[in-house]
Image (cartoon, helix red, strand yellow):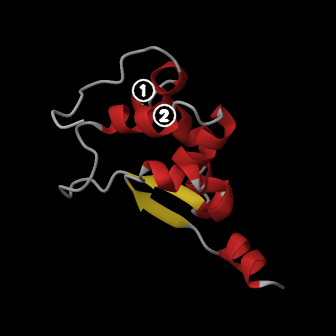
Amino acid sequence: MKPSEYLDRNCFFGASTPGEDDIDRRYLIGVGNIMWGNDLPHPEGTFPYTRYWIQRRFKDVPEDETRRMLGLTAAAVYDVDLDALAPIVDRIGPTVDEVHGDAPAGRVPVNA
């Protein structure tokens, strides 16, 4: 097995507030190897601007790739029951329109 294949199969990167470059390089890293992190409660995290940063980073990323990086990869890695999680996602998760559409993304940081 090539090292790149080993990495793709076994390594996952929880990026705390990934930058534009991180998202732009998703095909080099592997879309299925990147997991969004907001690093709550640390000050370098995204709270209380998480929806804003998600929209900034993922607005132009295809929806299926966005879903993988925002949660589906982590759910697979940690064996999370998506059906059990669905009511919570529906209640607190960002909507497709908040990420890819024109819905307001929530609070905007002063220095954004």
Residue beneath label 2, please? 89
Give how far across and how far down residue 68 sits, in percent. Answer: 62, 47
Quarter of the figure with the C terminus: top left
Locate residue 105: give its quadrant. top left
Quarter containing the N terminus: bottom right
Disc 1 is placed on an element classified as helix
CB under 8 Å between discs 2 and 1: yes
Kindly identify the residue that appears in the image at 63 percent across and 63 percent down: 29
Residue holding disc 1: 91
Circle 2 sits in a helix, a strand or a loop, which is it? helix
Q: Quadrant of residue 104?
A: top left
Disc on res. 77? none
Q: Residues within 10 Å of mark 2 (few under 14, many from 20)?
A: some
Could you tell me which residue is drawn at 48 percent across and 53 percent down? 21
Real-space CA distance between mark 2 and mark 1, rounded to the nearest whole angstrom: 5 Å
Image: 11 above or below 88: below
Residue situated in front as seen by the camera: 30 or 95: 30
- Vertical comparison of 101 with 23: above or below: above
User: Which residue sits at x=39%, y=30%?
Assistant: 92
The amino acid at mark 1 is Arg
Inspect the image, locate mark 2, and give the three-letter code of the amino acid beneath it.
Answer: Val
Q: Nearer the viewer, residue 89 or 87?
A: 89
Q: Position of residue 60 (x, y in %)?
A: 57, 32
Question: Label 1: how many residues lie within 10 Å, few (<14), some (14-19) or many (20+)?
Answer: few
